[in-house]
Image (tube, rainbow, N blue to C red):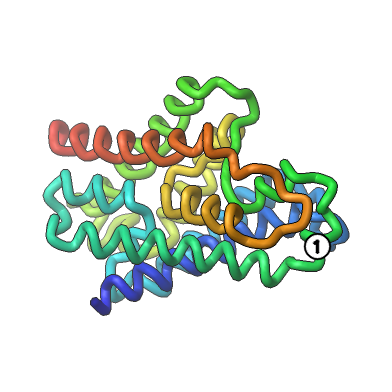
Amino acid sequence: MEQYIFEFLGTLALVLFGDGVCAAVTLNKSKAQGAGWIVITMGWGFAVMMGVLIAGPISGAHLNPAVTLGLALAGSFPWASVCGYVVGQMLGGFIGAVLVWVFYKDHYKATADQPDAMLGTFCTMPAIWNPWRNFLCEFIATAVLVFVILCLGTKGNTPVGAGALGAFPVTAVIMALGMSLGATTGYAMNPARDLSPRCAHAVLPIAGKRDSGWSYSWVPVVGPMAGGAFAAALYLLLF
């Protein structure tokens, strides 16, 4: 149970900082409004670092159902713990998104005439609507993420290689993925980062909000989970 609680706390921090930087850059009258994509990608990288620093020593800081699935398929994580980890991650993502709304509530009111912008502070939507291409983007980005995470645990990366640097390698990978592969879909790569905040958007009393983009919502869930599974298969084949 302690591991599940720390997955909850770590994912909460990830979404609080990650959706928080989206809100800061997007919402009206924010001092960071218009700061741009680089700030968002850096903010998400550091958001992952915050989650890893909180949960890493206790749960290993998966913070992502796709990572949990990939590690389980690769034989690096017990299947008996998968359900508890995923529940903790999904709940953490929901509460993290609610806290962002509470924090920026005045700015959401000031942005009530821009429903798409408000939705984008909770979850991802594609730059160009092409669901199967969007799925492929999420699949590839998440496969890279999970494959790198698995490689960090291989001989040569631990204990004296890059893996010994703790949270920094994954932080760098998140930033690199955001800058290089994130511009098409917003690089969800994580159902707890996307579906849980999307549910929060659906239930919160946000003035002027649009629908929560349910017709797209399968992409940032199925794409990352499939990508994580593929990364595990590739890792087992190569290593």
Q: Which quadrant is the C terminus positioned in?
A: top left
Give the percent coordinates (x, y) of residue 8.
Answer: 39, 69
* Residue in the foreground of this view, choosing between 108 and 143: 108
Q: Can residue 119 be seen in this view?
A: yes
Q: Residues within 10 Å of mark 1 (few under 14, many from 20)?
A: some
- Which residue is painted at 80% across and 62% down in the image? 107
167 left or right of 27 in image: left
Residue 212, picture quadrant: top right
* Residue in the foreground of this view, choosing between 143 and 196: 196
Give the percent coordinates (x, y) of residue 80.
Answer: 13, 60
- Which residue is painted at 23% across and 59% down in the image? 83
Residue 73, picture quadrant: top left
7 left or right of 114 in image: left
- Which residue is painted at 56% across and 54% down in the image? 44
**Direction bottom: furthest residue:** 2
Tell me the amino acid under the disc marked 1.
Answer: His
69 left or right of 177 in image: left
Q: Which quadrant is the N terminus positioned in?
A: bottom left
Q: How many labels does the image show?
A: 1
Figure check: 69 above or below 222:
below
* Residue in the foreground of this view, choosing between 151 and 83: 83
- Which residue is painted at 71% across and 58% down in the image? 206
* Residue in the foreground of this view, choosing between 113 and 237: 113
User: Circle 1 is placed at which residue position?
Assistant: 107
State the SS at label 1: helix
